Image (spheres, rainbow, N blue to C red):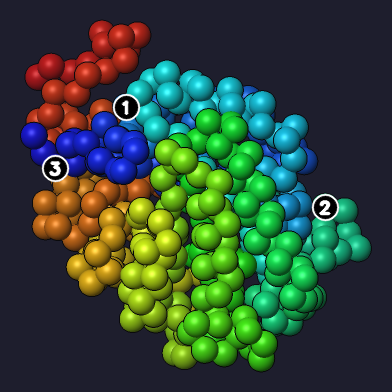
Amino acid sequence: MKTLFTPLKLRDNTLRNKIIVSPMCQYSAIDGFATDWHLVHYGQFAIGQVGAIIQEATAICPEGRITYGDLGLWSDHQIDKLKQITTFIKSQGTVPGIQLAHAGRKASCEKPWISRAQISANEENGWQTVAPSTIPFNVDENPPLALSLSEIKKVVTDFKASAIRAVAAGYKIIELHGAHGYLIHQFLSPLTNHRTDQYGGSFENRTRLVVEIIKEVKSVLTTESLWLRISATDWAEGGWSLDESIKLSEIVSQLGVELIDVSSGGLVKHQSIDIKPNYQIPFAQAIKQQANILVGAVGLIKTGKQADEILANNQADCILLGRPFLRDPHFVMKAALELGVDLQWANQYERGKETI
């Protein structure tokens, strides 16, 4: 059996294979509420036999959304539709996960197919953004407000409250979004965190927020697996580094995080990324080897063979794919055919299976 199609065993959960749908924002929620779009969107991946699905960035509070079309989990009323989605995902043998997030200074934006521009607080569908420091992502944007200590405490409690709702909705993987220039990442990097209090300056201070969030979220989980997505490097001088990512991964492993979802970049406009196939794999491999924690690999992984080789070379423990699933929701079936694996299809689709 190819490595890609062997189970991924977590402490209290097992994925039937090591292929995972990466969080991909759909910008199709209404006031944070999921719609039938989300049910069909995620349902098709489960029918396609994927091991797990990590639901798109789901905001812990209204001001934590990237756009006004983002999913949210700040209200108990938002649970019911999400529970319908997780129930269907589980019925197909797939493990449902959710990514809890706060966009920080990269919030209050227009949907990407319209413009991606930030919407000011006095415009329709816009609001005041917040961050560790008053540094905008784009120089022409209104600067975010620096969070006070009491507001930081609320961010922590909002993550905890959303995790409680996620458990109630049936998610078995809870991923915290600490990557791509969003709020947790903004606290981690000295490029965006210029604070002089206990949340800024030293590595210990810059990681304080994510550590506090992890402790609070972990306290409300039972059999759910806690994951953390990070940007392993900012790809910018003076920014968050791979060495810091390894150190943070060691720390959070002791706090109960089971897997690090290893991406990179997204924090600053002047980042310089050498984009090519497998360009982020060395980061995942370094964290896996040096931090003694499970890691997921991402980034320009397009074929089953490519994904299987990464796992066979012990560079990661699972593969998270985004755009390949948008191009082909049944990517897993194609990968199995490519690798010569006899995959069990859903009964309703079996007659479409290629046997040659």
Label 1 sits on residue:
49
SS category of the residue bearing label 3: helix
Instruction: Place residue 11 in its image quadrant.
Output: top left
Label 3 sits on residue:
3
Left or right: residue 9 compared with residue 110: left
Q: Residue furthest right?
A: 122
Label 2 sits on residue:
125
Q: Residue at x 55, y 75 (%)?
A: 208
SS category of the residue bearing label 2: loop
Alpha-carbon neighbours of circle 1 within 10 Å: few (<14), some, or many (≥20)? many
Q: Residue at x 27, y 18 (%)?
A: 345
Residue 124 in the image: state x and y as whole percent.
87, 53
Q: Give whichever of discs 3 and 1 has the lower sequence position.
A: 3
Left or right: residue 73 compared with residue 320: right
Q: Give whichever of discs 3 and 2 has the lower sequence position.
A: 3
Q: Give whichever of discs 1 and 2 has the lower sequence position.
A: 1
Give above or below for 193 relative to 253: below
Residue 235 in sight from this viewpoint: no
Instruction: Place residue 228 in its image quadrant.
Output: bottom left
Residue 74 in the image: state x and y as whole percent.
72, 45
Q: Mark 1 touching mark 2, by CB under 8 A?
A: no
Give above or below for 121 relative to 80: below
Q: Residue at x 19, y 31 (%)?
A: 336
Residue 151 in sight from this viewpoint: yes
Residue 319 in the image: state x and y as whole percent.
29, 49
SS category of the residue bearing label 1: loop
Q: Amino acid at mark 2?
A: Asn
Q: Tell me the quadrant of the picture where the N terminus can be found.
A: top left
